[in-house]
């Protein structure tokens, strides 16, 4: 194997990847080398969305891209959402709405939904369904997840109205 | 009962009946929850499994020499390296830990490897040289009983002849049909994974995702030839289960490699390996003949059921018992004759999956009820109501229903609930969805109802119990129970129970482990709310009794006058109050074992009081079908369910929606395609799970709350019924839309577009 050293910027931190192999996916490097195991590996062929991350603000399945192609880009994983003190509106809505059961799909869905609500803070249901249709959930049947999006969207809309009024 | 509330996040922890949020919810949304495949150890090696590419073959030789010499490889083990029990199995041991001279299904493990990197594991597995002599696989379950045995235990795993009433009872109307159910996968998102760590006492610690720690422990210990106390299993975070984790998979392999290398071993199946590495839902072939009077009264049912068990027994015996006992559906019928058999083939082994046995027959008996209604010119709802089981009726095993049976209630509420969907207004909502293929002119709508039922807990005389302990110290309750939390929310319920009974706020759940507490039984058969809920309740109640006695004694009070109130203990006859923290500065700890009422084996006629309790559900489906392309869009699902009592509305709703999604999958999407014993689609690209665009809203018409006698808090398990009647309702709605017979699920596009061709196959 050829060994390489490169740097990835994840959640605002720079990580040196030492002895990396060019064939390693971003998901593998995140999980096994950087020990950021919040991104999940349910299929590793881009079907389930459990490994969804943001790369330069775009949602991607981290299993489908080679880690080295993300050099020089800003990667955001589930660990980079919310803050240490407080979880994000979407994360809180997931807990409160009962959108979490086994939780394996949860990080990928939350990354997808954070991205959706940033683009469209008040999406209609069909838009939400389409946006999350690349994220498989085997436990919930999606009902409580859609409810979580409704709650988060409502809170975000209220917050932005408050900001406008100030 | 619909319109469930969102969570009240007040400061007081939720009690029984209130919306409670998961204690593991925040770690899960932050990505901090550790699942079994997130485990790591600085000194760990990776394990891997060499599997047979052939469904049936003799193994001439296995040469591991070159694999052993490779960089980073620490161990390569085969059947010759085993010194314990070489076979395992949940109901009886018939499955080799590693193949012994023969492979009976595609994916059967032959050798295992430990190496320093998964890539080196992969290379070593490729370097193992196996010489096979191929055998023509037995892939047709119908031929199993007349073909040479593929296993020393024979090709018949179990057979039940159920005879109830008389071998007569022909009514004026007879309808007949044959039905088929394909092989469904549980597809939990977390694949099989875990870590084994050798311990200094010569034993092993295994951290693994499973449904039943103690049953795994016993099988692992036997295979390792270790006493059970030296094999300690601890539950690692479980990414869903649905039956896929009731049997052991990589457990023994992990331990063998850890003991051989002296190092921690991690294994994590890929999705493809997962498809080969766990059992599936039994494919079923069913023939039915229903007899009824012209007023719709059922007079007799005859049926023949054939389940394909695949190469090994797994839980086939229990699955067949369910299929047979519940074959008639939730209806009164005086005369019944059913032959059920589950056979061995060289197909992938089948076993537990949500609603086991009942899912398959529900599809058939509900199709028959529709056919009967049609032949009688009767409304299908009216026909079902006319024959619906009531409390005090006998089911077809001769067992009298002594508990609740609100069958008519689930049917009526489900049938009467108003539909809230209009016609599809956007292309995305049409069959084909994102593919934008449907021409609205060719779309027909259909609607239908189906009813199902199932036993709760383990049946047929099994000694079914759960163990839990409760410790109360400094006002904090700690619950220890080996119940596997697989996503269903037992952790939430255990906290609610402790709060309800002890008036505490803080409830800690100790890790689920075989090292600290007795068995909780399996997280399956809709049993943990009742069984482990019952054990936690008993332990908390006994703690309460002891606490009140202790206070009564030390404060010279009448124990009868003392009551638990929020945060403390008060007297009804004086102004005495003691803070709970103060009252429990000395701990009180109690362990309790909870058992349900005894059940009994089925006799030679399939008769007996084999079951504990029954749960009923109804689904109504609305579908749009593109007749030209054979695509189905399920537009709406309405459901009513017999739940006994609602313990946590939020989690209950999640079970109803999630179960219905799995039922939808079996109806129109999900099938493991097996040809000549080989799986054609072991990936999420080719095995289609319902997405958010496939799944319609689930309207809860009614949650029927009739407290079940003997059930803790009166609650019935709720996990399985949603996966039972949903499939049948959707299939029936597609029939209603198209006028086709559709005798098979999943319904494939070709079944709709070329029905003649399929019927002639």
Image (tube, coloured by chain):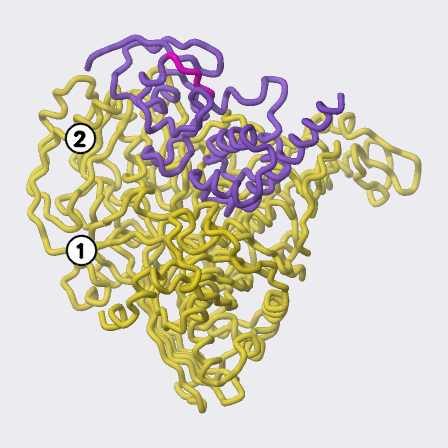
Chain colours: A purple, B yellow
**Helix, strand or loop at disc 2?**
helix
Q: Position of residue B12 (x, y in %)?
A: 75, 34
Chain bearing mark 1: B
The residue that label 1 is drawn on is B676
Q: Position of residue B161 (x, y in %)?
A: 35, 73
Residue range corresponding to the magenta coloring = A72-76
The residue that label 2 is drawn on is B125
Chain bearing mark 2: B
Q: Position of residue A94 (x, y in %)?
A: 58, 35
Are the residues tagged 2 and 1 within 8 Å (C-beta)? no
In this rendering, position of residue B395 left or right of residue B703? left
Q: Position of residue B669 (x, y in %)?
A: 37, 54
B650 vs B695, nearest the viewer: B695
**Which is more N-terminal, label 1 or label 2?**
2
Residue B248 seen in the figure: yes
Q: On the image, which quarter does residue A98 sit in?
A: top right
Q: Is residue B264 above or below residue B230?
A: above
């Amino acid at each position: 194997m050829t060994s390489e050293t490169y740097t990835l910027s994840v959640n605002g931190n720079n990580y040196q990847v030492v002895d990396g192999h060019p064939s390693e996916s971003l998901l593998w490097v995140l999980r096994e080398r950087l020990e950021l195991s919040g991104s999940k590996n349910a299929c590793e062929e881009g079907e389930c969305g459990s490994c969804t991350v943001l790369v330069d603000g775009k949602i991607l399945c981290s299993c489908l891209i080679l880690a080295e192609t993300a050099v020089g880009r800003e990667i955001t994983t589930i660990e980079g959402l919310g803050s240490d003190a407080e979880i994000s509106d979407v994360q809180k809505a997931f807990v409160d709405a009962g959108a979490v059961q086994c939780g394996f799909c949860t990080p990928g869905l939350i990354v997808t939904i954070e991205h959706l609500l940033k683009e469209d803070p008040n999406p209609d249901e069909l838009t939400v369904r389409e946006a999350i249709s690349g994220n498989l959930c085997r436990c919930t049947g999606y009902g409580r997840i859609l409810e979580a999006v409704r709650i988060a969207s409502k809170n975000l809309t209220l917050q932005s109205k408050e900001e406008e009024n100030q | 009962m619909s319109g469930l509330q969102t969570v009240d996040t007040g400061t007081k922890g939720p009690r029984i009946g209130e919306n409670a949020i998961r204690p593991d919810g925040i770690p899960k949304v932050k990505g901090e929850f550790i699942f079994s495949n997130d485990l790591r150890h600085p000194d760990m090696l990776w394990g891997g499994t060499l599997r047979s590419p052939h469904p049936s073959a003799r193994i001439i030789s296995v040469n591991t020499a070159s694999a052993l010499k490779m960089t980073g490889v620490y161990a390569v083990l085969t059947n010759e390296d085993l010194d314990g029990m070489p076979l395992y199995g949940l109901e009886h041991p018939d499955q080799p830990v590693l193949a012994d001279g023969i492979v009976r299904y595609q994916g059967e493990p032959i050798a295992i490897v430990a190496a320093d990197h998964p890539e080196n594991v992969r290379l070593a597995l490729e370097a193992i040289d196996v010489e096979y002599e191929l055998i023509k696989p037995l892939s047709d379950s119908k031929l199993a009983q007349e073909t040479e045995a593929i296993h020393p235990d024979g090709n018949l795993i179990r057979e039940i002849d159920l005879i109830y009433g008389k071998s007569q009872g022909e009514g004026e109307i007879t309808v007949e049909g044959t039905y088929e159910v394909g092989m469904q996968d549980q597809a939990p998102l977390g694949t099989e994974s875990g870590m084994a760590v050798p311990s200094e006492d010569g034993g092993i610690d295994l951290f693994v995702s499973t449904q039943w720690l103690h049953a795994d422990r016993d099988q692992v210990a036997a295979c390792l030839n270790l006493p059970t106390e030296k094999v300690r299993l601890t539950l690692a975070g479980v990414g869903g289960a649905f039956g896929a984790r009731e049997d052991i998979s990589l457990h023994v392999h992990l331990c063998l490699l850890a003991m051989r290398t002296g190092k921690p071993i991690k294994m994590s199946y890929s999705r493809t390996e997962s498809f080969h590495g766990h059992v599936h839902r039994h494919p079923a072939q069913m023939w039915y003949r229903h007899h009824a009077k012209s007023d719709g009264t059922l007079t007799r049912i005859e049926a023949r059921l054939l389940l394909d068990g695949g190469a090994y027994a797994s839980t086939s015996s229990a699955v067949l018992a369910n299929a047979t006992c519940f074959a008639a559906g939730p209806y009164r019928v005086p005369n019944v004759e059913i032959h059920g058999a589950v056979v061995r083939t060289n197909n992938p082994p089948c076993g537990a999956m949500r609603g086991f046995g009942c899912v398959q027959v529900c599809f058939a008996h509900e199709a028959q009820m529709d056919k009967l209604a049609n032949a009688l010119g009767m409304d299908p709802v009216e026909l079902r109501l006319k024959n619906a089981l009531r409390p005090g009726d006998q089911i077809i095993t001769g067992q009298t229903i002594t508990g609740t049976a609100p069958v008519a209630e689930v049917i009526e509420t489900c049938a009467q609930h108003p539909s809230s969907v209009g016609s599809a207004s956007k292309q995305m909502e049409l069959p084909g969805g994102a593919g934008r293929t449907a021409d609205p002119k060719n779309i027909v709508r259909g609607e239908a109802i189906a009813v199902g039922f199932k036993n709760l807990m383990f049946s047929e005389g099994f000694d079914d119990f759960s163990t839990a302990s409760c410790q109360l110290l400094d006002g904090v309750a700690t619950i220890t129970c080996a119940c596997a939390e697989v996503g269903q929310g037992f952790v939430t319920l255990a906290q609610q129970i402790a709060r309800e009974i002890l008036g505490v706020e803080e409830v800690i759940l100790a890790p689920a482990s075989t090292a600290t507490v007795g068995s909780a039984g399996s997280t399956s058969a809709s049993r943990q709310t009742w069984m482990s809920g019952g054990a936690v309740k008993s332990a908390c109640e006994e703690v309460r009794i002891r606490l009140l006695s202790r206070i009564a004694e030390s404060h010279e009070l009448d124990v009868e006058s003392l009551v638990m109130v929020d945060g403390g203990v008060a007297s009804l006859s004086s102004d005495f109050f003691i803070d709970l923290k103060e009252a429990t500065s000395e701990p009180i700890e109690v362990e309790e074992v909870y058992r349900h009422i005894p059940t009994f084996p089925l006799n030679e006629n399939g008769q007996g009081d084999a079951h504990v309790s029954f749960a009923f559900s109804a689904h109504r489906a609305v579908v749009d079908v593109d007749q030209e392309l054979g695509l189905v869009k399920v537009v709406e699902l309405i459901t009513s369910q017999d739940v006994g009592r609602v313990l946590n509305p939020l989690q209950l709703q999640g079970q109803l929606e999630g179960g219905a999604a799995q039922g939808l999958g079996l109806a129109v999407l999900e099938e493991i395609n097996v040809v000549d014993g080989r799986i054609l689609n072991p990936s999420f690209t080719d095995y289609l799970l319902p997405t958010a665009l496939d799944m319609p809203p689930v309207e809860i018409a009614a949650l029927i709350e009739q407290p079940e006698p003997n059930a803790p808090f009166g609650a019935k398990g709720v996990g399985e019924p949603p996966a039972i009647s949903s499939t049948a309702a959707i299939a029936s709605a597609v029939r209603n839309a198209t006028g086709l017979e559709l005798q098979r699920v999943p319904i494939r596009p070709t079944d709709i577009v070329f029905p003649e061709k399929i019927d002639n196959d």
